[in-house]
Image (cartoon, grey):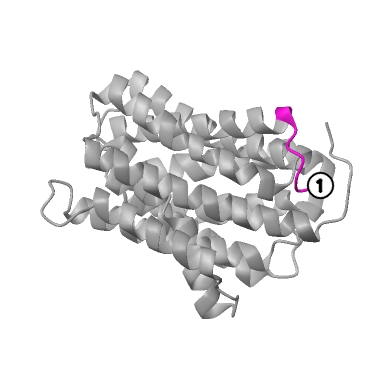
Amino acid sequence: MQTGHAGHVPTKAVLLIVGSVLCFTLLDTIVKHLAPHYPIPLLVWARLTFQAVAMLIWLGPTMKRNLLRTPRIGVQVGRGLLIVASSFLFMSALKYLPLAEATAISYSSPILVVVMAALFLDERITGPRIAFVIAGLFGMLMIVSPGSDIFDGATLLALSNAFVYATYQMLTRKVAEEDPRITLLYPGLVGALIMTAVLPFVDIGPIVPLADIALICAAGLLGTLAHFLFILAFQRGPASALIPFTYMQLVWATLIGWFVFKDYPPSWTLTGMAVIAGSGLLIALHERRRTVMRAPELPAVE
């Protein structure tokens, strides 16, 4: 699926990635609006079930049973369990934290992946990687500094999500050679099955207004669209070149949080977000440079 030289970044692929993270931010915005009024399991169910159903409708007719075939079913199911836990933690954090801060803390997961890869995958941790990790952790501490208003249970939920999602990314590395469509399907499918089994035991309330039903459906569709855009982007350009553009989500989250929820981050929080984004971008660019040095020339799919 993934083609192209790691140094070539097609414009179409960049636009798809930027659109994808915008969809994710709009999804988070809806969740933040609905979370104070509805149980988190309902929102997690909508998020994962819409994704699974849409992907089955989209890819099922052409891939048929191949869509479910994987040599590492245990790893794929484990990824599904982790994405359920990550969704619970992040949506719960969004209920209390400003959109930009919750998003920024979640973007510390690439930094955690570097540490976890050195501990569990025996990957060599180089000097630049150490520097980027330290900078990223420093930025995270600026956002969740002890004594600040947001250093509370909600922040711990966001931090826990970062660790869980970093573990999810570690497992994703183990299936990196598989078809990305299969790798994207399994978390949604496993999560949808689990949450559908849980939903009958969730107290949703007697009446859900039609407008809120529409928003819940929209949240599920936005998450699905975001994943579709990711697939299309990675069909047109290499992941190592596209990952840095995902940090546009921090910009979207800050702007939408400001306009919709009137939450404008204080200066130290903005500085912490910039440090996290900068360290994450430098890690991505560092790894991209290493990939470019090793990668053969391949034509990109426009």
Q: Amino acid at mark 1?
A: His
* Magenta stretch contains residue 87: no
Residue 150: where, in percent of width, then height? 17, 47
Asked if one can make out residue 199 in the rendered structure from this viewpoint, the answer is: no
Viewer-closest of 2 and 71: 2
Residue receiving disc 1? 5
* Magenta stretch contains residue 11: yes
Please tell me which residue is depicted at 25% across the width and 34% down the height of the picture: 265
Pointer 1 local density, CA inside 10 Å: few below 14, some 14–19, many at least 20:
some
Quarter assignment of residue 74 = bottom right
Residue 89: where, in percent of width, then height? 34, 53
Viewer-closest of 178 and 238: 238
Q: What is the magenta range? A: 4-12
Left or right: 202, with 55 as reference point? left
Viewer-closest of 154 and 39: 154
Please tell me which residue is depicted at 49% across the width and 51% down the height of the picture: 280
Q: Is residue 239 above or below residue 124?
A: above
Viewer-closest of 152 and 193: 152
Q: Is residue 283 above or below residue 238?
A: below
Please tell me which residue is depicted at 38% across the width and 42% down the height of the picture: 274
Please tell me which residue is depicted at 63% across the width and 57% down the height of the picture: 287
